[in-house]
Amino acid sequence: MSVRERALAEQAVLSALAGARGRGKEGLSPEQLEQLNSAVEALEADGGVAAPTTLPSLDGRWRLLYTSRPGSASPIQRTFTGVDSFSIFQEVLLQQEGGGEDGQEGGPRVNNVVEFGALGFLKVEAQASTDGRPLPGFTPRQGEGLPLFGKSANYPPARPNMRIDFQFDRAAFNFRFLPFTIPYPVPFRILGDERKGWIDVTYMNSDSTFRLSRGNKGTLFVLAKDVPIKQRLMDAVAAADDEMVMSLVSLLEQDCPVPAPARSPLAGGTWRLVWSQQAESASALQKWGSKQAESFQVIDAEAGTAANVVKLGGWGTVRANAVVEAASDTRTAVDITDAALYVGPLRIPVPAPVRGAKGNTPGYIDWLYLDEDTRITRGSKGSLFIHRREQEEEEAPAGEL
């Protein structure tokens, strides 16, 4: 696959997962599931970077975005991964040096972390073994296992340096309101083969931010590196890397920190447009405005108004005014009332849909992501916008904006 084909396949995976709930437990239509499986198949056939378990960039904290649920998965796995309010991570520490008695305090490890919000987290830890750094005395899992814990596969890895064998050795609940940890009620040391497993890195991209893996119980995992995705998005915007921007938008869309952005006070304010992808059906005025260096949207949620403002250097301003109202938790209805070019004291009307005119159907924007200083929205004609919040300033007359 070419670089572009890989990027498009990654984006297809993330787009298919946009409607998933419970990390894939429900919410995927047959069409989305087909799109997901097709893109995953293409990426796994390509493999991405070679010998991923030898690369230092595999190390780090990975957020679980999706997991399939074969009948062979364990009940514990199905329970924790299906709860949206939990955040689930995998810590990969293959480059970690050994130390401590029996390797307990160091050496290669792979840990699973379930975060319960403000309450705390559960960490299930395991010693890891790879082709390049085998664990002394370790014997990989052999049997299928007990039905209670899920059936395990025994096939060899498709390529060298892609499999991480592991054995769980400790786990504990860490509650923030307690000064001590609570041991996880599973006696790993007496479980023998049942505490062992493996996970294959079936695809990882060149910048080690997106990964597909399959476990010994047949589960597919889709993971993203838990790094500041928003900063990577701004870097991609600055580099005009539109394909990377689209992939990162899909990641942020799945982790919006505001549950009802269209109704949130954070939606109000002055927003500078920093990137857009204009749909073919977008209006000529919108396409023109999105290409200008000084393009803003000003939202007054209390008054129910919004304005798109384009500053033309020091000689003029184009402003389109609208009435806005939250139509749902994630959608704002937008009804344009007028548009004009302001040059000094002059107001020159610009052709635009007039509220109530024949054939004028109010539009909308869908909020894909919102936090204190960044928003990502999609318009009713399909255009995608990324805005950054501007410092609040005293409202100026329309012709002086």
Image (cartoon, helix red, strand yellow):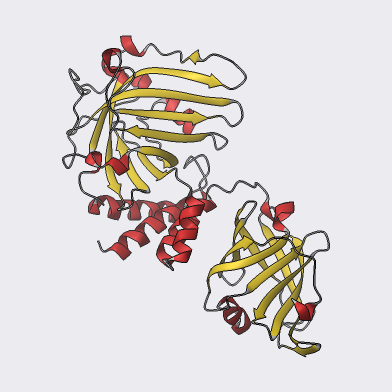
Counting from the top left corner in percent of width and height, residue 229 is at: 48, 50
Q: Quadrant of the N terminus?
A: bottom left
User: Of all residues shown, which one is farthest toward the front?
Assistant: 314
The x and y percentages for residue 38 are 33, 55
Which residue lies most toward the right here? 303
Task: Give percent across and percent down for residue 203.
Answer: 29, 47
Relative horizontal placement of residue 149, taking residue 366 as reference (left or right):
left
User: Please, is residue 324 above or below residue 267 in the view?
Assistant: below
Query: Image quarter for residue 130?
Result: top left
In the rendered image, is residue 18 in sight? Answer: no
Q: Residue at x 32, y 9 (%)?
A: 190
The answer to which of 277 and 229 lies nearer the viewer is 229
> Which residue appears at 54% of the width and 70% of the height?
276
Q: Is residue 293 left or right of residue 393?
A: left
Q: Is residue 308 above or below residue 90?
A: below
Splitting the image into 4 quarters, where does residue 107 fall?
A: top left
Residue 374 vertical position relative to residue 225 in the rendered view, above or below? below
Query: Does the rendering let one see residue 316?
Result: yes
Please give the count of numbered marks on the rendered protein: 0
Quadrant holding the C terminus:
bottom right
Give 189 or 347, whichever is nearer the viewer.
Answer: 347
The picture quadrant where one finds residue 327 is bottom right
Residue farthest along the top direction in this orientation: 190
Residue drawn where x is 30% and y is 26% of the image: 151
Where residue 167 appears, as percent x and y from the top left, is 29, 21
Q: Is residue 153 left or right of residue 339?
A: left
